[in-house]
């Protein structure tokens, strides 16, 4: 019986970690390209909302997933315009976008669904009954979810994409040393737009997962996940696999917290784990985490 | 200089105009008349004393957090932690307020105020220390500390100091409560604006004098403008960072004076919902000048109460959208006129 508890714990951990992982890998792409992305929280929220909206009107959850990705990208586009084109403060832009997303989703939730708390119920994604995987007890619920399988593929692909592809090399070069990249013919602005939009697509997909998992949109449903994703990105040292690992760790802590909820144990201290871990890692107490050199610094072309 | 001044005035005005225009599109999109909605907003906020009282009430905490962010900005530091600092500060105010009921008012009131400042100062000092000692970026650490503060106060108010069936502490002693303005001006009747509004104005003057007239304030500004030159000139950057973040946190902590001593008379979990973050917007719009901060806080206070006024015909979240657009246009427009962000950027990079 004990292993059933363990399997349930694992599957719960994975489900919790999916939106974290998608958003934190998104953040990794953005920051590797030199643009700090605090807007992950708002992107998740907008992605969830557009995903619910599209599913609601078309009845097709796959279109909903696509809409989540596009909604995320549209949100990220605002961030790219303000911080890359206008070279404005990236952190403030991100915070403003989070305020915007919170306000706009609530606004339209009231206008479209006539409720200040939740949307109508939507259809979720179908389950995939894959051979062999469908026979694993408990974990089959994990392996039958298209978005979870997709996330696993994305995690591995992102690692290769960032460190083994020409695009990845260019993206990292504009995040580390934009002047050098520019002198080699890399278009710094275009690469930074690409990084930010990629983060929008991934975090938007994370939002779609939240919507599909819950079969509805609820007010403020991102509930700080974008900030946890940011923490995971740092603990994972701006590295997709590392970020995903950190997300699993944070997800496990949260899963543990849910198991303990009935026992009247103060869960607040478990809630603190991701944030404390980030502070410890940033201070270099356990394996120092160093951001890309030009992260957060707008690129000003040399005037000759 | 003239260009700078034009920027300081023009950018916020353009930003407000742009957000009003964008808001009109949202209003029209749901089939309402923008003129009607904006008219209602103006009349409800500045059209009568009750409305003005509500605006001042909403503006009070924003002045504190706006000043907090502005002071850190001046020293080249970015304090996103006002939200966490104000929770710790407000809790400290309440704790002192209900733990020493035998003290007379003339002792308890200043003690409570000091407790709020001290609580916030402690929470601001931590990221300052982490930056000075380890070069860890204050932006990330203040974000993390916000969540830790919420969890910590959440724990205290759920398990240690709570009134059963509620998410708030017991009431502070009567003599620790500060009067509402309606007690002096009956025209404000019904509005919770209290004397902490004048405390906020006084602190704004104090911050101005500190930054402009004291040696210490000069050192902090020098640090913000050019850290390496400041260090060459004999200013200790490490201690400067810690001091600036501590003072900034203390200002945020004073929000507790308004909320606990002047309004609810107890600490309530999750009461802020973004006052700390809005402080960043207030500081930016106010160009980090104490007078600008007060004016920006009044504007954001008016929007924040205005949302409630128009809620009957347009969802009140319209004002969140307006506020966000103001911020985005201000930061985008700033680069066109002058470089407010420049000192900030320099400041964030010199350690670590």
Image (cartoon, coloured by chain):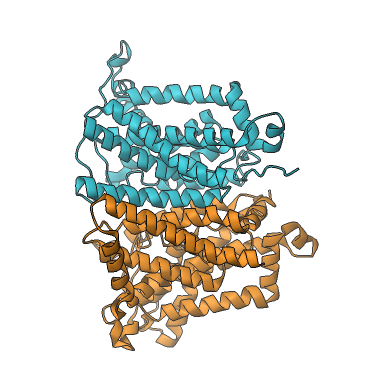
Chain colours: A cyan, B orange
Q: Nearer the viewer, residue B104 or A44?
A: A44
Q: Quadrant of residue A118?
A: top left
Q: On screen, A166 above or below B107? A: above
- Residue drawn at x 34%, y 32% as measured from the top left: A67
- Residue drawn at x 61%, y 78% as measured from the top left: B209
Q: Position of residue B103 (x, y in %)?
A: 41, 84
Quadrant assignment for the C terminus of chain A = top right
Q: On screen, A148 above or below B205? A: above
Q: Position of residue A135 (x, y in %)?
A: 28, 14
Q: Position of residue A94 (x, y in %)?
A: 48, 48
Quadrant assignment for the N terminus of chain A = top left
Answer left or right for A253 relative to A294: left
Check the image and name the residue furthest to the top.
A131
- Residue drawn at x 64%, y 41% as measured from the top left: A294
Q: Quadrant of residue A125?
A: top left
- Label tally: 0
- Residue drawn at x 29%, y 67% as measured from the top left: B39
Q: Nearer the viewer, residue A141 or A167?
A: A167
Q: Position of residue A209 (x, y in %)?
A: 33, 33
Answer left or right for B309 relative to A16: left
Can residue B249 be seen in the rendering of this structure? no
Q: Nearer the viewer, residue B127 or A207?
A: A207
Q: On screen, B200 above or below B134? A: below
Can residue B67 be seen in the rendering of this structure? yes
């Amino acid at each position: 019986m004990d292993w059933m508890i363990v399997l349930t714990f694992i599957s719960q951990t994975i489900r919790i970690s999916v939106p974290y992982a998608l958003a934190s890998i998104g953040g990794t792409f953005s920051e590797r390209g030199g643009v700090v992305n605090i807007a992950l929280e708002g992107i998740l929220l907008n992605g969830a909302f557009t995903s619910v909206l599209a599913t609601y009107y078309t009845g097709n959850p796959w279109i909903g997933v696509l809409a989540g990705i596009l909604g995320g990208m549209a949100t990220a586009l605002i961030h790219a315009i303000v911080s890359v084109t206008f070279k404005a403060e990236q952190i403030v832009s991100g915070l403003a976008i989070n305020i915007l997303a919170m306000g706009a989703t609530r606004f339209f939730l009231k206008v479209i669904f006539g409720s200040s708390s939740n949307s109508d119920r939507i259809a979720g994604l179908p389950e995939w009954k894959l051979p062999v995987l469908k026979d694993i007890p408990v974990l089959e619920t994990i392996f039958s979810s298209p978005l979870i399988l997709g996330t696993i593929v994305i995690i591995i692909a992102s690692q290769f994409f960032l460190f083994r592809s020409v695009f990845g090399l260019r993206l990292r070069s504009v995040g580390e040393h934009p002047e050098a990249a520019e002198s080699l013919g890399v278009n710094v602005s275009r690469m930074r737009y690409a990084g930010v939009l990629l983060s929008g697509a991934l975090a938007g997909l994370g939002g779609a997962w939240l919507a599909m998992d819950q079969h509805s949109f609820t007010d403020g449903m991102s509930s700080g996940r974008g900030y946890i994703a940011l923490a995971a990105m740092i603990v994972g040292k701006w590295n997709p696999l590392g970020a995903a690992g950190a997300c699993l760790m944070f997800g496990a802590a949260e899963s543990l917290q849910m198991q303990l909820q009935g026992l009247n144990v103060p869960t607040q201290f478990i809630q603190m784990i991701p944030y404390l871990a980030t502070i410890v890692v940033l201070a270099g107490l356990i394996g120092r985490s160093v951001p890309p050199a030009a992260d957060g610094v707008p690129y000003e072309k040399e005037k000759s | 200089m003239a260009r700078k001044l034009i920027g300081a005035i023009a950018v916020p005005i353009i930003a407000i105009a742009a957000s009003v225009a964008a808001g009109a599109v949202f209003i029209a999109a749901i089939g309402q008349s923008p003129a009607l909605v904006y008219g209602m907003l103006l009349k409800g906020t500045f059209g009568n004393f009750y409305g003005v009282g509500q605006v001042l009430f909403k503006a009070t905490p924003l002045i504190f957090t706006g000043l907090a962010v502005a002071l850190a900005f001046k020293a080249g530091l970015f304090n996103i932690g006002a939200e966490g600092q104000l929770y710790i500060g407000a809790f400290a105010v309440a704790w002192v307020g209900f733990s020493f009921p035998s003290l007379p008012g003339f002792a308890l009131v200043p003690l409570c105020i000091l407790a709020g400042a001290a609580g916030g100062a402690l929470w601001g000092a931590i990221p300052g220390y982490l930056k000075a000692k380890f070069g860890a970026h204050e932006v990330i650490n203040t974000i993390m500390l916000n969540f830790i503060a919420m969890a910590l106060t959440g724990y205290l108010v759920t398990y240690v100091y709570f009134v059963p069936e509620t998410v708030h502490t017991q009431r502070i002693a009567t003599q620790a409560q500060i009067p509402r303005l309606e007690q002096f001006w009956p025209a404000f009747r019904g509005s919770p604006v209290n004397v902490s509004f004048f405390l906020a104005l006084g602190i704004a003057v104090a911050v101005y004098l500190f930054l402009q007239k004291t040696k210490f304030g000069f050192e902090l500004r020098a640090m913000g403008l050019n850290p390496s030159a400041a260090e060459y000139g004999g200013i200790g950057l490490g201690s400067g960072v810690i001091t600036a973040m501590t003072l900034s946190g203390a200002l945020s902590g004073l929000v507790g004076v308004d909320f606990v001593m002047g309004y609810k008379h107890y600490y309530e979990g999750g009461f802020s919902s973004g006052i700390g973050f809005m402080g960043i917007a207030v500081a930016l719009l106010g160009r980090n000048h104490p007078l600008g901060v007060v004016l920006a806080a009044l504007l954001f206070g008016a929007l924040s109460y205005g949302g409630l006024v128009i809620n009957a015909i347009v969802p009140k979240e319209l004002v969140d959208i307006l506020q966000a657009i103001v911020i985005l246009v201000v930061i985008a427009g700033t680069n066109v006129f002058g470089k407010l962000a420049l000192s900030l950027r320099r400041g964030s990079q010199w350690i670590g």
